[in-house]
Image (spheres, grey):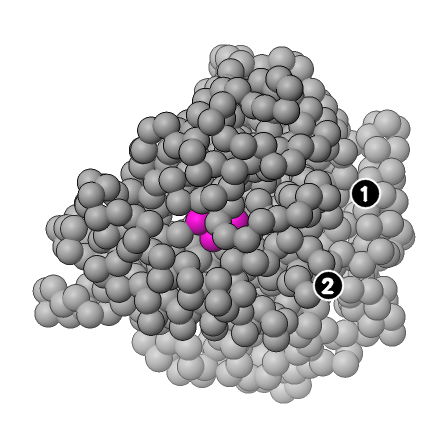
Amino acid sequence: MSDMRDEMLRTLDRIVEDTVTTALREAADEKASGGGAGQGDATAALWAALEAAGITAIGGGGEDDVAFADAMELVRRAGYHALPVPLAETIIARRLLAKAGLAAPSGAITLAVPGAGELPRVSGGALAGVIQGVPYGRAAAHAVVASQGQLHLVAIHDALMTRGTNMAGEPRDALDLARATVVASVSWPTAAGDLEAEGALVRAVALSGALSACLDHCLTWVNDRVQFGKPIGKHQAVQHLLAQLAEETAAAGAAADLAIEAAAVGPKRFEVAIAKARAGEAAGKAANIAHATFGAMGFTREHPLHYTTRRLWAWRNEFGSEIYWQAEIGRVAAQNGGAKLWPLLAGEVETR
Amino acid sequence: MPQFSFEPVVMPPEAIQLRQEVRAFLADEIQKGSFSPAVGSMVEGDEAFSQKIGAKGWLGMTWPKEYGGGGRSSLERYVVVEELLAAGAPSLCHWIAERQSGPQILRHGSERAKRMILPEIAAGRCYFAIGMSEPDTGSDLASVKSRAVKAEGGWRITGRKVWTSFAHRAHYVIALVRTSGTPDQRHYGLSQFIVDMKTPGITVRPIYNLYGGHDFNEVTFDDVFVPDDMIIGGEGRGWEMVVGELAFERSGPDRFMSTYPLLAEAVDELGPDPERMQAAEVGRAIAHLATLRRMSASIAGMLNDGKSPVTEAALVKDLGTTIEQEIPEIVRRILPVEPRGVSSDNGYADLQQLAQMQCVSYSIRGGTREILRGMIARGLGLR
């Protein structure tokens, strides 16, 4: 681990410790607050602290920027902490803008990835169309959007159409692109697919962090909770559950690493597909194990476990569920045929 | 909190080049009809094939040259192992000897054992079996009852081993026996011996498996003499030896690729335009295998650095055998698999049936699921 990475991660840990209280998590959680508390106000101090530490400005390339792998470790740690701000989105958006040769604005930047049949239309210098489920669409000042063959940076202050949330209460809003201002556009033939893949990459990496958090929560609990006269972690049935949780956590981590490494040199859709498919599957299993381990306590609002498990459930769906990515992997395999399956697995077949 | 780390490894250029060499060689062998891809390379053995691999310098690759090895890295060896499995090559003969017996002898064997045995393993001419289980000793390995007593210049072993894979064709068996103490003293007093299968007093009786294959044996030792310098690691260090072998035994691609040839066949059978759920089933298996490759290579890297990642190896084996066992299930979910017997040529359907019957053993051999999960729980600090 590089010194810079270590330093950055410790900074993030410290900010979380100082800022992310249960009250903040509750206020930021739209499922609990019903949106009334104003997510933006609650997390403004957290975002300001991250900004002051320089953590929100990484990913854009340039001389002072951290390596891509280091940036992805920040995303993983943010996932671990169930951080209620669009840090992952901002990091990956800045990376895309840098690749497109566009200057990144300051502040939060989100990704507006069109669903099937949602690809925005371009006419004149403006965009038209609605994109659903944009992460933190209400809080971010800018979004990176794809249209047919182009990547755009748009200002979205006035584009918010409907507020929505994912299962974890994270804002997932609908944007009306006709009300957004196009700041810059660049030709990028595979923009829509790449935007989706980069989104899937950060979700896979964040899932890996959230899985680690899940394992930590469970280990603490089974060592503390006593039933039948001993900590429940001393019971073999519970030990075997946690062994499986550790396996899934390790597998998701390795799958995310695989994609991070491949993506460092360019969009690697096939490796991202593997990571999102494997981490997504791990997420479902892990959430089940965690809730089995915690019993009724883990099913309460009061216990913080749900900040992690609801994110596992939400994130595995976002930017393509595991079925979506598995099917894509399977189609690539089918097109290559059985004889080329092994070279494909060994990363030797060009898949774009 | 304890969590397991699988640091990325970078394949050196020589390993990348070697992969192409091995693949070309295997394609050529298939072309020449020297073998046809099988499910579970570890159940098909061909002496001539093992000798060809040995002549190529692809056995004992990591061992020093003075013992017939290649002085190469664990990552290069990893590549060879993967390619053999991917091709479904008949590698059973040399498998155990090359994977764990050789490394064990290299690290803990006498000079004579090293000089006599290692070059033969590396040449693909010398095969091993592992004598651990007994009629009353399965997962509870420390309960072995076979016993060796001291004799002039060596030891005399008496006892019975079962489920001893490949003993009927092996030149040596490494037997775990008690040299002092009693079974209730558990790990104390156990020793590992290299026993020449030609020694008088050894009887090998086949135990056929559920589909009629002959892999298992019962091996009876009746006052079998073993010279002093054929003890591994010294008297009373048998348990330590067994544990040390585990990272080699459990982390390799043979713990997740046994049914890979079936998956490749199924992909061909599906054709270029599968339905969504068919594609997803195949894609899921690929995502698992790609992830396991990375974890297993990471362990090869740790072994290369002289570490003994026993818990990480247990984790890879449990995950790996799970997907190996799922592949026959996946294939029957996405393709028709009617029972048409295993002798006629039905392509993927034959492979599916064989894999179906074989794969139940994957989570037993080399440590059961329950034992592995117990080890992982210990690694998590729960035991």
Q: How many marks?
A: 2
Q: Which residue lies at the image location 55% right of the left edge and 53% below the top edge? A: A106
Answer above or below: position of A314 versus B127. Answer: above
**Label 2: chain?**
A
Q: Is residue A1 magenta?
A: no
**Label 1: chain?**
B
Q: Nearer the viewer, residue B116 or B156?
A: B116
Q: Is residue A88 magenta?
A: yes
| Quarter of the rendering occupied by the C terminus of chain A | top right
- State the SS at label 2: loop
* Between marks 2 and 1 in the image, the one whose residue lies nearer the viewer: 2
Could you tell me how far apart the alpha carbons at marks 2 and 1 are, in whole angstroms? 55 Å
Q: In the picture provided, is B229 more to the left or to the right than A85?
A: right
Q: Position of residue A274 (x, y in %)?
A: 57, 39
Q: Does residue B251 appear in the picture of this structure?
A: no
Magenta stretch mostly in which secondary structure? Answer: helix
What amino acid does circle 2 point to? Glu
- The residue indicated by pointer 2 is A63
Q: Which residue lies at the image location 47% right of the left edge and 27% below the top edge? A: A179
Q: Position of residue B360 (x, y in %)?
A: 45, 39
Answer above or below: position of A335 versus A62. Answer: above
Q: In the picture provided, is B33 more to the left or to the right than B291?
A: right
- The residue indicated by pointer 1 is B49
Q: Position of residue B191 (x, y in %)?
A: 53, 77
Q: Does residue A160 appear in the picture of this structure?
A: yes
- Start-end of magenta stretch: A86-90
| Quarter of the rendering occupied by the N terminus of chain A | bottom right
As drawn, the residue found furthest toward the left would be: A228
